[in-house]
Image (cartoon, grey):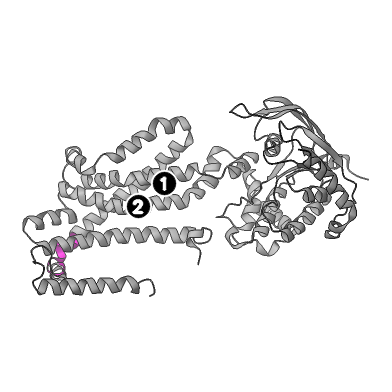
């Protein structure tokens, strides 16, 4: 029998964006009246051309900036958010282990406990051997995995990713995508993944949203029809090609 | 060896050439002394020069230490808010443009002849690069990392200690490197007026037409500057070696 309390805390976050509006200081309206419901535990990809407000949207969801209108309601109200940036953004003076443990350190977890948790997460992203190294000694793919480990170390219920793999070579990116998908399946968290890569959105997400060029409108909102298990074999599958075509058509109308 | 040998060659060549030129009568020895004469002055006046060197070193080091502490503290304060920065930074810049040689007599009025004036002079001349570089470093923290610290609820104090200060360290050390040379200059200028150390030796030897002794004192002042610079480089290498690109092997 499952413990109902555990089941509840182990859920991802559900979000409801209601008429969200965001205006920059120069009176440029970036997002105007955006409505979007995101289910708990969903893997949502947000696609759109450069400058369409994807990153702005992500920052508002992370509560790093507040909407100028409308509201973002979450269920539950309190939860841990993690953010993965386009580049790894590690602290160069810290080892891999101390970089990974940083969020726990900032939240006041003791040294032993946070190192133990960090080691476990590093093992999950395949970096157990590298814990004593400094970022300058790592490849860009390894750095991004440390960044991912740092995001996961607090067991976030909401994981926000802003084009995290855009700067990586294709093979590294493919493998990281598989790894991310796998991590998402094993944890209960909602993932919002911003990207401008159509193949990445189609491969990773259960649902893809295509934003319009201006004012953060939504052109396409599609639940993808792909198997839950996603390996590199899927990349040559016709079903993935079909999903990509739909997303591409929506992007091209812009 | 690779680092010591190449600069040694021009030194030896220039020294020998100078010696030859002075001995051959091409350069009058009352303008430029022969290197051997400088060496003799160093040996003959070793007690006087050693005691002067000790005083100048102490003053330069204390002045430099004070500008490091005060400069970093002021930069932290300035970086804490835009308003504070706008109100006070112009004065820091203004402070820097005041020629030390012009206010040195004022220092004597305030601090009297001796050590205090010399330290004040070294301090005033060397503090600005510490403030400017530290401030630049503190203000150029990666915005993504600032967001990350906010996301995990870090206080401004924690963010300063764990993020902004270590991130600014390479720039702070650059400021200290510039400041170390300036502190020696400030000390010597202070000594011209305040009357002690190598600056005073230079001043007295000049009036006695002892160019060889002037050169000996100048040489020691340069050695002091180099030693301080080397010290900062050592600190820099020790703190940055593991993580900063500037200290990574080729």
Chain of the residue that carries numbered disc 2 in the rendered image: B
Residue lying furthest left: B208
Q: Is residue B147 visible?
A: yes
Q: Is residue B156 above or below residue A198?
A: above
Picture coordinates of residue A47 (x, y %)?
76, 42
Chain name for mark 1 = B
Residue sitting at x 78%, y 41%: A251
In the displayed structure, does residue A136 sit left or right of residue A117? Answer: left
In the figure, is residue A41 to the left or right of B41?
right
Residue appearing at x 69%, y 36% in the figure: A53
Q: Position of residue A41 (x, y in %)?
A: 83, 42
Which residue is painted at 81% across and 50% down in the image? Answer: A204
Mark with earlier residue (1, 2)? 1
Position of A18 with respect to B55 (left or right) is: right
Marks 1 and 2, how far apart in space? 10 Å
Give the residue at mark 2. B178
Point out the stretch of residues depicted in magenta: B42-51
Q: Which one is in front, B98 or B120? A: B98
Residue B133 disc label: 1
Q: Residue at x 36, y 60 (%)?
A: B231
Q: Are marks 1 and 2 in contact (CB under 8 Å)?
A: yes
Q: Is residue A122 above or below residue A58?
A: below
Q: Residues within 10 Å of mark 2 (few under 14, many from 20)?
A: some
For this orientation, the residue located farthest to the top is A69
**Number of numbered discs on residues:** 2
Tell me residue B116's x, y (percent).
22, 45
**Which quarter of the picture shows residue B224?**
bottom left
Which element is circle 1 on? helix
Q: Is residue B43 shown in magenta?
A: yes
Who is closer to the viewer here, B18 or A115? Answer: B18
Examine the residues drawn in magenta and state their main secondary structure: helix
């Amino acid at each position: 029998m499952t413990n109902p309390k555990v089941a509840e805390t182990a859920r991802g976050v559900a979000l409801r964006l209601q008429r969200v509006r965001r205006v920059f200081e120069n009176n440029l309206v970036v997002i105007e009246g955006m409505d979007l419901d995101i289910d708990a535990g969903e893997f949502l990809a947000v696609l759109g051309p450069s400058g369409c407000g994807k990153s702005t949207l992500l920052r508002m969801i992370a509560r790093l900036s507040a909407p100028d209108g409308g509201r973002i309601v979450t269920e539950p109200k309190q939860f841990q958010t993690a953010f993965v940036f386009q580049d790894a953004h590690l602290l160069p003076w810290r080892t891999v282990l101390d970089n990974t443990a940083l969020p726990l350190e900032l939240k006041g977890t003791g040294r032993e406990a946070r190192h133990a948790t960090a080691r476990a997460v590093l093992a999950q992203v395949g970096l157990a051997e590298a814990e004593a190294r400094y970022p300058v000694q790592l490849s860009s793919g390894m750095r991004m995995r440390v960044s991912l480990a740092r995001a996961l170390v607090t067991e976030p219920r909401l994981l926000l990713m802003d084009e995290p793999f855009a700067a990586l070579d294709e093979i590294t990116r493919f493998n990281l995508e598989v790894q991310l998908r796998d991590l998402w399946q094993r944890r209960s968290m909602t993932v919002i993944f911003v990207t401008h890569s159509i193949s990445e959105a189609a491969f990773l997400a259960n649902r893809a949203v295509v934003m319009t060029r201006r004012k953060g409108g939504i052109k396409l909102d599609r639940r993808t029809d792909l198997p839950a298990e996603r390996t590199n074999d899927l990349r040559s599958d016709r079903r993935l090609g079909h999903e990509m075509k739909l997303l591409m058509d929506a992007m091209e109308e812009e | 060896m690779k680092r010591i040998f190449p600069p040694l060659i021009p030194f030896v060549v220039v020294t020998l050439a100078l010696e030859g030129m002075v001995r051959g009568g091409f350069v009058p020895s009352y303008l430029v002394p022969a290197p051997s004469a400088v060496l003799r002055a160093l040996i003959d006046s070793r007690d006087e020069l050693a005691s002067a060197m000790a005083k100048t070193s102490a003053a330069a080091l204390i002045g430099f230490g004070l500008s490091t502490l005060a400069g970093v503290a002021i930069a932290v304060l300035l970086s804490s808010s835009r308003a504070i920065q706008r109100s006070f930074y112009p004065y820091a810049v203004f402070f820097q443009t005041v020629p030390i040689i012009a206010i040195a007599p004022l220092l004597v009025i305030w601090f009297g002849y001796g050590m205090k004036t010399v330290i004040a002079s070294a301090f005033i001349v060397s503090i600005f690069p510490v403030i400017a570089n530290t401030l630049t470093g503190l203000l150029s923290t990666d915005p993504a990392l600032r967001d990350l610290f906010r996301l995990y609820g870090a206080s401004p104090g924690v963010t300063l200690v764990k993020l902004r200060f270590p991130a600014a360290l390479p720039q702070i050390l650059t400021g200290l490197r510039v400041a170390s040379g300036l502190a020696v200059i400030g000390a010597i200028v202070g000594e011209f007026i305040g009357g002690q150390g190598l600056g005073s030796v230079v001043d007295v030897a000049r009036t006695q037409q002892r160019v060889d002794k002037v050169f000996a004192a100048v040489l020691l002042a340069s050695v002091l500057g180099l030693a301080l610079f080397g010290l900062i480089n050592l600190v820099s290498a020790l703190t940055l070696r593991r993580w900063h690109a500037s200290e990574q092997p080729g």
